[in-house]
Image: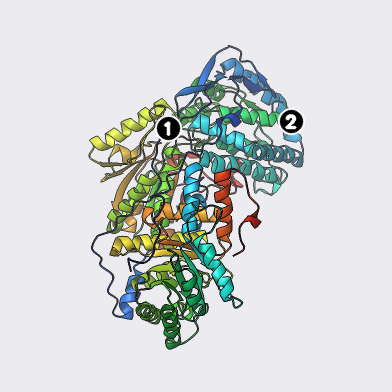
Amino acid sequence: MEQVSTTHRIASGSAVVRIPDTASLPVIETEAALRALLASLSGVDAVGAAARAAKLATRSLKQSTKRDALDLAISMVDLTTLEGADTPDRVRSLCAKAWRPDPADPSTPSAAAVCVYPDLVATAREALAGSAVAVASVATAFPSGRASLAVKLADVAEAVAAGADEVDMVIDRGAFLSGRLGQVFDEIVAVREACGTAHLKVILETGELVTLDAVRRASWLAMAARADFIKTSTGKVAVSATPPVALVMLEAARDFAEATGRVVGVKLAGGIRSAKEALRYLVVVNETAGALWLSPRYFRFGASSLLNDLLAQRTKQRRGVYVRPELFSGD
Amino acid sequence: MDDHPVLASPLNALDYDPAPESAAVAHLHESYGLFVGGAFTAPEANEQFATLNPATGRALATVAHGTTDDVDRAVAAARRAFPAWSTRPGSERAKYLFRIARLIQERSRELAVVETLDNGKPIRESRDIDIPLAAAHFFYYAGWADKLEHAGFGPAPRPIGVAGQIIPWNFPLLMAAWKLAPALAAGNTCVLKPAETTPLSALVLADIIQQAELPPGVVNIVTGDGRTGAALVEHPDVDKIAFTGSTEVGRMIQRRAAAAGTHLTLELGGKGANIVFEDAPVDEMVEGIVDGIFFNQGHVCCAGSRLLVQESVADEVVRRLMRRVDQLRVGDPLDKNTDVGAINSAAQLARIRELADAGEAEGAERLTSACALPSEGFWFPPTVFTHVAQSHRIAREEIFGPVLSVLTFRTPAEAVAKANDTTYGLACGVWSEKGSRTLWVAERLRAGVVWANTYNKFDPTSPFGGVRESGFGREGGRHGLEAYLDV
């Protein structure tokens, strides 16, 4: 009796997104125009979005897919330390780790960036000289965003002057939730200008926006204001990145790219600690936004402890045995 | 900005490597007998037939063809078991149902693989939907067994007697659970006839029933084809027939049952409409349409096989839908990453092909997923027809395959009129962010089930069943008990 099933080449499951060559960004000159743009967006059914995310989580990554995905995830990490207790030494150690995450295995890719407070940007810049690892800095009165625009812009200017390649700003959630959309938009535009050539990541703090409808609208608002990345969270509130939030933000980035020709990246931050979770998010990227976003240029994980689990799983894939976690340095 | 340091991606897309579940965990036997009187027995006439793996077209095992004499033995065993089973305290009957539910959970991996091998459905669906739901039905009705007097059918509702239950091939174990669990909870004894092309999971269930030490004869399982089913329907000592299957066979059964005065419930075909308004939550709606028609290869009686979409968003919905359809991974049902598996039989494949060809001949536009299909076994690619008219065969006849017909409408009244323009009435879906409109439409749909902003959601606590040519009687929930009580 036949017991062995056959295997066949099948569709990759990756989403095919058609991005127009000529960009046509939405013209937002009034708050009414912004309001109209956001009102034109489809609602999100929260139950359906959660069900879709849960279904994607059942994908099984094996063999070379798993090996490639682990390397890709490592290359997407923004290795982060955002504590009051941060010291220059700790930042230098983090930079070394981001540059060569596993000194025992030179084939390990570098992380994408090191993410620090503005006063430590110069330290990181110096420590990473000669590497391809970017220096990212939070700014705009991170994490609460509760400061005047002048203070926020000064914060950004300091980070950029110290050599930040990327700036992670927070939006004014109070203004967004109370309907002062123009204020949020104008702030992002102003920060974008202050960034100069640095990349701008706009943190929506989805845990405070609460509904997926608000996440979708805030994503479009930030993208229309020329964000280079939209980012879930500061990591400083109870709820950070979740699979349904990631799904909705990736849908927003996909739809925005198709509508405007401008590709905006997505960064998930806060609470992602295991390689398993990271790989599940890569599946969401693959099947929602598609191959273009499967690159550190357009997708990042903001995390600290995640990197060590990715390294442990990578070593397991290569050596066939699990290694002690202590094998990898703490920072 | 482009000189910003970025690292090259090591891969273009996550091209998932094969992740096959092991076929060996099915522990299939070479051949199976009939489960009568609590034991596997040899059939009266030694007639056997093979059940195939539809993904390869090769035989998995042989099963017995139950003759009229075999059906007679099974009904007699059920009759003998009835007095003791029906007078047992409800809490005692519940004990057995709980035991069966737990054993289904314990052997869920084996059952999922057996179901996928015999039916062709993806392992993800048998693992995550069929088997857990089957266990959930036994758990749910175990809870009712000692509370029947509170179910709203009088102070001391009595069972009907011997129930003959004929189930289809699309959800073999789940349909067995839908039929057996309420019948046993209510105190009936059963003769179950699994579908000819998918008998194996019911035979594993027979093994579980033995393991649970259910008293002999309370459940009997007789495999065979339509002749076996006919013998069960025509048996004079069967008090109740419960049938799930085609409307054509349902009609024949109803004629017979009407003449004999047998209790009857029928769950038949459907031509479900998924109604999409322009304010629908678009991403979840696309998932819902895909799930509505490509879940279980479209072998679903309540499949959303007609998409009624508001004209103002029709092009955009079809564009997004086709992007999603092209992503569906069609292939080895045992691969954990497969979305759409094999068509259950050569006969069903021929029927799907015939109707799809008719759709093209009648002038509808055929859009087919570009996926490669395996060379052996029975396969049909996910297919969407646009520009479908109400009069086309693909808009009227149940295809029971992965084929969606797209029609458009302009007003809610037109949507309702088109949705109801069918001889069936099993299920519909309504997609809108406006609750008042959803309720307005749902009130006017002639269907047993209406889903709002979702599709193909099943739960043991929720009654399921149709109106008009989709049948009558309800399965699931408190309502499902009525089919097995003499009320």
- Of residues A268 and A213, the one nearer the viewer is A268
Q: Quadrant of residue B249?
A: top left
Pick whichever of labels 2 and 1 is earlier in the sequence: 2
Residue B378 in the figure: left or right of residue B105: left
Q: Which chain carries label 1?
A: B
- Of residues A56 and B142, the one nearer the viewer is A56
Residue B146 in the figure: left or right of residue B45: right
Q: Mark 2 lies on which chain?
A: B
Residue drawn 38% across and 28% down?
B375
Distance between the alpha carbons at the discs numbered 2 and 1: 36 Å
Residue indicated by mark 1: B343
Tag 2: amino acid: Glu
Residue B120 in the figure: left or right of residue B41: left
Q: In which quarter of the image is residue B62?
A: top right
Tag 1: amino acid: Ile
Tell me whether marks 2 and 1 sit on the same chain.
yes
Q: Helix, strand or loop at disc 2? A: loop
Considering only vertical position in the picture, is A185 above or below B189? below
- Of residues A107 and B170, the one nearer the viewer is A107
Q: Helix, strand or loop at disc 1? A: loop
* Labels in figure, total: 2
Considering only vertical position in the picture, is A217 above or below A148? above
Label 1 crowd (10 A; few <14 / some 14-19 / many >=20): many
- Label 2 or label 1, whichever lies nearer to me, is 1
Label 2 crowd (10 A; few <14 / some 14-19 / many >=20): few
Residue B213, numbered label: 2
Percent across and percent down for residue A10 are 39, 39
Residue, far top = B45
Q: In which quarter of the image is the N terminus of chain B?
A: bottom left
